[in-house]
Image (tube, rainbow, N blue to C red):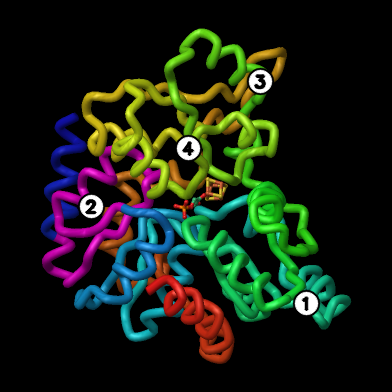
Amino acid sequence: DREKAESKAKIKQLLKEKDAVLVAHYYTDPEIQALAEETGGCVSDSLEMARFGRDHPAKTLIVAGVKFMGETSKILSPDKTILMPTLEATCSLDLGCPIETFSEFCDAHPDHTVVVYANTSAAVKARADWVVTSSIALEIVEHLDSEGKKIIWGPDRHLGSYIAKQTGAEMLMWQGECIVHDEFQAKALRELKKLHPNAAVLVHPESPASVVELADAVGSTSQLIKAAQTMDNDMFIVATDKGIFYKMQQAAPDKNLIAAPTGGNGATCKSCAHCPWMAMNGLKAIESALENSDSQQHEIFVDDALRLDALKPLDRMLDFAM
Ligand code: 13P
Ligand code: SF4
């Protein structure tokens, strides 16, 4: 742990030297979230990360999360240097939604409004009319539905189905999923609920419908943290990436938090409630990104024309969320 302490000290010094600020997602490892807090950075959901980075005066943002979060930061702050601990940290939703095929899907339904989840490439965002994150998706689709719009939704089919069910909106669905949330098991969750009848179940809507059905609260990471803080129950079963426990426990120190099952009933988990790409954001990787900030090995670039096209639907979301 001496090595970790040294690494943290080095990062703190480099952040100052490079006029940089650390922006971390709730799914990164606890020590990364703690470091972001200690150094005046931010730990938040993907919507807040985008806003914080855009509004912060630092010249450089170091985004501890996955690639789409770095790209979103660059689209919103073209004059800032956007670094990531590793450019390899991607997302199964982004990977499962290549621009060529997604664009063909949109072209086949020209009378539809294209709404894409933030977990997509800059190119997919540029093809969209609206970008949404999970904390604002429901309201935006509700709004579009009230205007009589037919919607193309991509890429998360579980989040899409949840929103379609809640709003009654007509939605053509891209068939992508998050490898972490897709693994939560309804049957095993029902068994766990029996063992803890007073526990409330908190579910991120990237989870399968069978799991969402068992929820007492459904929402984005920040909404789930709020739920743990405000609901009366003293125990919560949590169906989202386990990185969230750090902030959730901080927000609700007297509550007992347990993880929803990803295995059981003969199923074995692969990601086991922790995103392998979020896990790449280690201390050493952050240190290296800051140390080699001029090497471009950690830097996010977005083509300028593409950036302007992707900015429109992103700004639409941010204006709506005001
Ligand atoms: P939110 O923090 O917006 O809920 O996003 C969840 C997620 O899966 C990010 O990768
Ligand atoms: Fe993508 Fe899921 Fe990882 Fe979030 S948790 S980055 S949605 S794979």
List the residue tagged with mark 4: 241
Residue 268 image label: 3
The answer to whether 104 is drawn above or below residue 84 in the figure is: below
Categorize mark 2 by other alpha carbons within 10 Å: few (<14), some (14-19), many (20+). many
List the residue tagged with mark 2: 36
The answer to whether 34 is drawn above or below residue 319 in the figure is: above
Of labels 2 and 1, the one closer to you: 1
- Whether the magenta-drawn stretch holds residue 290 is answered as no
Mark 4 falls on what kind of element? Answer: loop
**Where in the figure is residue 2, as x and y percent of width and height?**
15, 32
Task: Identify residue type, mark 3.
Answer: Thr
Quarter of the image with the C terminus in it: bottom left
1 or 4: tag closer to the N-terminus: 1
3 or 4: tag closer to the N-terminus: 4
List the residue tagged with mark 1: 112
Task: Identify residue type, mark 2.
Answer: Ala
Find residue 103 and report its image quarter.
bottom right
Stretch of the chain drawn in magenta: 14-43
